[in-house]
Image (cartoon, rainbow, N blue to C red):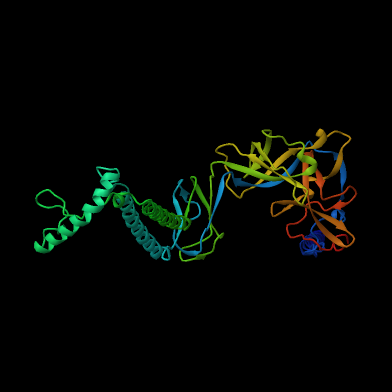
């Protein structure tokens, strides 16, 4: 009897234990909280944003800029034409005096031939005019060997009879007077009177004037050839200094017009950082001052090499910072520079400040998202120094506004924050 009661109790205890174990494994799972929707990017405590406070003004202001070659030459077309030659492409090195591009010169070749033909004609005419002038000056005797009234009367009576006899002898002996001088040493030319042998100054002056006209024509022909040479040079783009082709604007076969750019040549071994400094800060910039710069993730010191004398429409002044030789940079890279702040960041100078994790970057520009009653506004910032977990904001925010911390990458202006505050 007792054994049967024991068996019954043991079975009862085993059933109770088995039920407890089964209920433990088979119980329903606890309800999970609903998964956050796509609109819930951040906790509800951050939906309305963090208030923008104030902090002492930063000792330096951060300005964005870009790297550019120090010596850049833009070669432009000086004449219209078709491109028949280009040297290399972007990134190729060019030596000083090397031909970069050339235009066709088909239209100049006929002009060259005509100019050289005109020069040859003017050269021959000037030589002939020179001979005629020398003949007028030195080709005839100036006076007779004997002079005076007696000889003048003698030759007026004798010369005509002599010339008549000479003509008669020439008819009797053909060929005797065909040469200027006879075989016997005497001249067969007609005698000239003293008056006839005198120089004709008007004839000499005409010969001289004709010679000078021919010389002027010779100079004009040479000037025409020089003009064609200049036109031929204008059809070639030659680099004035050694460098690298930064950009090429034309290809072989393109038709260009005067003033159209052909190529940019720059020296990539000498680089500058170009920044735009607000007028309020430009007084803190001095020539040859060292300025901390960050380029391509590398911190280095650059020297102020140039300050433009005037501000632009945005109330900024262009400043160039010379990078050290061998800096790991290339033209076009984004760079950041820190310029001294007026007053050196004294305690009396306060500026808005936000948590560092409230600053995002859109296209290399620092921005913050301000929470307003109408939604989210994106503000582009100009940053100062970072102190602890807060960063000074020199422009873009006002104290008292609320910014969103840890903004997601797809957050944009106009998004609503009402869904996040629920």
Left or right, 171 with respect to 273, comes to: left
Give the residue displayed 51% in from the left and 64% down from the top. 80
Which percent across, then down, holds residue 276? 72, 46
Left or right, 179 with respect to 273, comes to: left
Which percent across, then down, holds residue 171? 12, 64
Which percent across, then down, holds residue 320? 66, 42
Residue 86 makes an appearance in the image: no
Q: Image height check: is 145 above or below 179?
A: above
Using the image as rendered, state which of residue 359 and residue 324 is in the foreground.
324
Left or right, 415 with respect to 128, comes to: right
Which percent across, then down, holds residue 252? 46, 63
| Residue 149 figure quarter | top left
Q: Image height check: is 162 above or below 38?
A: above
Q: Which corner quadrant holds the N terminus?
A: bottom right
Using the image as rendered, state which of residue 109 and residue 7 is in the foreground.
109
Residue 80 makes an appearance in the image: yes
Give the residue displayed 48% in from the left and 45% down from the top. 242
Using the image as rendered, state which of residue 413 and residue 25 is in the foreground.
413
């Amino acid at each position: 009897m007792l054994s049967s009661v024991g068996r019954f109790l043991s079975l009862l205890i085993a059933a109770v234990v088995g039920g407890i174990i089964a209920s433990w494994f088979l119980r329903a799972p606890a309800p999970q909280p609903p998964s956050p929707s796509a609109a819930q990017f951040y906790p509800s405590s951050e939906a309305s944003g963090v208030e923008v406070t104030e902090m002492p003004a930063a000792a330096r202001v951060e300005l964005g800029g870009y790297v550019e070659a120090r010596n850049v030459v833009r070669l432009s077309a000086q004449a219209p034409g078709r491109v028949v030659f280009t040297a290399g492409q972007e990134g190729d090195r060019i030596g000083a005096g090397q031909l970069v591009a050339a235009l066709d010169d088909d239209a100049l070749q006929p002009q060259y031939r005509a100019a050289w033909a005109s020069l040859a004609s003017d050269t021959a005419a000037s030589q002939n005019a020179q001979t005629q002038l020398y003949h007028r000056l030195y080709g005839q005797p100036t006076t007779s060997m004997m002079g005076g009234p007696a000889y003048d009367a003698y030759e007026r009576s004798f010369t005509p009879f002599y010339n008549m006899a000479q003509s008669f002898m020439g008819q009797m002996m053909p060929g005797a007077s065909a040469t200027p001088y006879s075989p016997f040493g005497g001249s067969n030319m007609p005698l000239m009177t003293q008056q006839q042998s005198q120089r004709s100054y008007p004839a000499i002056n005409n010969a001289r004037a004709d010679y000078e006209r021919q010389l002027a024509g010779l100079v004009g022909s040479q000037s025409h050839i020089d003009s064609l040479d200049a036109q031929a040079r204008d059809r070639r783009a030659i680099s004035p200094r050694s460098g690298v082709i930064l950009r090429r604007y034309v290809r072989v076969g393109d038709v260009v017009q005067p003033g159209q750019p052909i190529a940019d040549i720059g020296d990539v071994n000498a680089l500058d950082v170009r920044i735009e400094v607000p007028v309020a800060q430009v007084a803190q910039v001095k020539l040859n001052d060292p300025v901390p710069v960050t380029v391509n993730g590398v911190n280095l010191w650059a020297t102020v090499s140039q300050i433009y004398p005037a501000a632009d429409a945005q109330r900024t002044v262009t400043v160039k910072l010379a990078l050290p030789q061998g800096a790991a940079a290339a033209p076009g890279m984004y760079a950041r520079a820190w310029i001294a702040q007026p007053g050196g960041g004294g305690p009396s100078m306060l500026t808005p400040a936000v948590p560092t994790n409230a600053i995002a970057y859109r296209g290399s520009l620092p921005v913050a998202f301000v929470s307003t009653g109408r939604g989210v506004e994106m503000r582009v910032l100009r940053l100062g120094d970072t102190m602890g977990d807060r960063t000074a904001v020199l422009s873009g925010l006002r104290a008292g506004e609320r910014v969103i911390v840890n903004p997601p990458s797809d957050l944009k202006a106009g998004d609503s924050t009402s869904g996040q505050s629920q």
